[in-house]
Image (spheres, coloured by chain):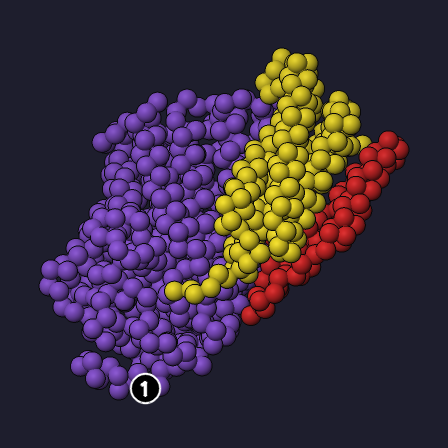
Amino acid sequence: MRSEIDRVGLKIGMWLFLYSEIILFGGLFVLYAAYFHKHPASFAVGGKELNRVIGALNTVVLLLSSFTVAASITAIQKGSRKLTIGFLIFSIFCGFIFLVNKYFEWGAKIHHGIYPNSETLVNGEPGLNIFFGLYYVITGLHGLHIIIGMVLLSISLALVLAGKIDGSRFSMLDNSGLYWHLVDLIWIFVFPLFYLVL
Amino acid sequence: MTSTPSFYHQSAPPGLTGIKAWLLTHDHKRLGLMYLGAVLFWFTIAMVLGLLLRTELMSQGRTIMGPGLYNSFFTLHGVIMVFLFAIPAIPAIFGNFFLPIQLGTDDVFFPRLNLFSWYLFMIGGLLAIVSLFVGDGFPDTGWTFYVPFSIQNSKNVGLTVTAAFILGMSSMLTGLNFVTTFHRMRDKRMGLMQIPLFTWSLYSTAWVQILATPVIGITFILVVLERLLSIGLFDPDKGGDPLLYQHLFWMYSHPAVYIMILPGMGVISEIIPVFSRKSIFGYKAIVWSSMAIAIAGSLVWAHHMYTSGMSDVSVFVFSLLTFLVAVPSAVKVFSWIATMYKGSIEMTPPFLLALMFIYLFSVGGLTGLVLGAAGTDIHVHDTHFVVAHFHFVMFGGTGFAFFAALHYWWPKMFGVMYTFRAAYWGAVLAAIGFMFHYVPMLILGLQGMPRRYYDYLPQYETGNFLAGFGAYIMVFGIIIMFVNLLMSFRKGVPAPADPWGGTTLEWKVPSPPPVHNFIDKPQIMDFPYDFKGVGEQSQKNGR
Amino acid sequence: MDNQDKPHVLSYSQLAGVLIILLALTGVTVGVSYVHMGFLNVPIALAIACLKVSFVLLFFMHLKYEGPVIVLSLIGTVSFLMIMIGFTFWDVAFR
């Protein structure tokens, strides 16, 4: 039996899981690349229809939350529990803001008749249909990951509150943090690919 | 030595009794056996389905089933054999059981995750069963679920694809567990070049499982989304490209072929030196070829698509790359043969099965070259030749390696010895039946009989009859093999700790092993296949 | 094997520095997107994204201080992703 917690091992396990997440999104990026090559003009038109400001705002929100998650890990290692809790609550709040923004963004698009299999898209330019199809699939899957990340951070928060995570045992927080950063990483690519193309 | 109770008599975590000791166990050995039970169940079902398919094809026209049922049956046969037998069989059963022991440790790194993988496996299997009986029945798309058929058809594709997704997740988590165990739980005194080859092969397999499986995950998610929302990502009318589905599908499914075969090669690399009483030839070459196969295997996916209408450039590139994979596979085959050369061969059932593996796998590999060359592939694409080729590799390869592993490690897992004579009979009949079954299919394919067809022209009847006949012999042989193994419980001849004269760590512990695997600190040899001193030990065992 | 006793602790100011760089790069990438350079926009946007990702990986995700297992395997994963995308172009670019 293992006598002590192997922190490095737990981290390796988490990274391996993150690889699988990277490849999961990777499959969609393969599609994006191939279709961008096929319909560059439509992708540019589609990109113009997305709101750059909301996109940039969401990027900033995620970057901020990534920072606070990293800071919460520093805080727990330095032994300041209150600061950890504060950072974590802020991060989860950021995730929430992101989702609210996304909700309004999707809502506006759907209101304009742009959603999978809608009249506008089916009868319109095929490239646009693909652009928005990918947009919904990728941002949808990403949103799902935001929710999972928020759940993981909340669990960590609960464990910190219960005193189960402290300066000597914080692998759960560390790994939830890694997951949250991964969600951020993917967004860093999604943002220019969809909002800033051409 | 006899004073320590085996893992059957002690539960991990301690204090569990009865069925709970199994269903809630963290013990990698119990989980391995639980996988064994599940996998054998699926194997039996898929084997019966295959037999029914061949029976249907034995004569022209309708024989025992209608065309709709036939289509569903071959899909079901493929899905089960791929996702519920060939992919999990060796890693999940023998990998779980022996990887920690070979690394000199007491369990995998994430024991609870390991249990979770088993439950995912069972849930995936259960969903596959459910999808048989709800809705419009089991899909008839073939195990590849190619669009547009899989999106337009009314059968239960969504549920089946979800089942495959969950099974993929189970396989991925097992791989994750193995890689972490390999790096963090290995005995500190065991260097990289002192690790048994079976464990090395599992390690390279695990990387393929981690990196390739998510691709099929997202592909299947897209199929489900397309069915629910008709986004049109693969629909040419809506700007999509159906070929990209095939790209994504084979990006996983070609590496998956190596998930199936690499652990089998690892098993053979264990068996050959033990019964040749000779150190394995080219240990490092075998280690590197395992990694090379894992890497090269992920570069060649589009060789399944030569005739699908993709660009000529990519046909050329992928054909060229495909030939690269033959190199590391051949390195292994030659190393096994060189190991036997001038060895002191001791014939046993696992060794015989390993020899059969080498032969059948080589035929599979060489017919693979025919398919890998773009020119000849156009002639035999989607014919029975392809079917025969991958059965040579997947069944003659993985299947026979699975049988060999079962016979090799049976005494260790259950602590009982089986009868050799019946095992030989079973193996020989299975191999003869195998040749009768698949060689006619190679010829039929060259003559132009397409795969997956319900009916055929009169000139193909002889070949199809022979193939069906061979299938019955083969199944008969496999039944003898299994019955013989099961009879060993009845006879109950106890197996010694090291019945074969093996040198890797699993043979240093009692059969069956105690719950923490090692009673004393394991002795790590400088080289895992050093047979000095094995002779005297077998004499002590009375053999 | 890797040393596992003392994990490296990043100071708040280091993290804040990284955050400022990331925010600045976000500003740059949005700004550049208003300048029309034809096809060049895509590689520039992607290069900036890669730069940002490296900062997140190295500091927020601690990669700079991890052992060889994690670093090498991440490189392997990214290479596999590149192959997935790149080799698909053998087909789509020449059809």
Query: Which quarter shows the C terminus of chain C?
Result: top right
Residue at point 25%, 29% (across, down): B65
Q: Does residue B413 appear to the left or right of A144 in the view shown?
A: left
Q: Position of residue B469 (x, y in %)?
A: 23, 46
In the image shown, does B361 or B60 lie closer to the viewer? B361
Q: Position of residue B203 (x, y in %)?
A: 47, 61
Residue A53 seen from this side: yes
- Above or below A37: residue B436: below
- Above or below B108: residue A40: above
Query: Which quarter shows the N terminus of chain C?
Result: bottom right
Chain (yellow): A
Q: Position of residue B513 (x, y in %)?
A: 27, 67
Colour of chain B, in one word, is: purple
Residue at point 26%, 35% (across, down): B56
Q: Quadrant of residue B404?
A: bottom left
Q: Does residue B464 appear to the left or right of C91 in the view shown?
A: left
Residue at point 54%, 22% (across, down): B230
Outermost residue toward the left? Answer: B491
The residue beneath circle 1 is B533
Q: Position of residue B484 (x, y in %)?
A: 16, 59
Residue at point 49%, 24% (across, down): B227
Secondary structure, mark 1, is loop
In the image shown, does B337 or C24 lie closer to the viewer? C24
Disc 1 residue crowd, few under 14, some 14–19, many 20+, Cα 10 Å: few
What kind of residue is marked 1? Gly
Q: Quadrant of residue B72?
A: top left
Chain (red): C
In the image shown, does B467 or B250 lie closer to the viewer? B250
Q: Does residue B218 appear to the left or right of C11 in the view shown?
A: left
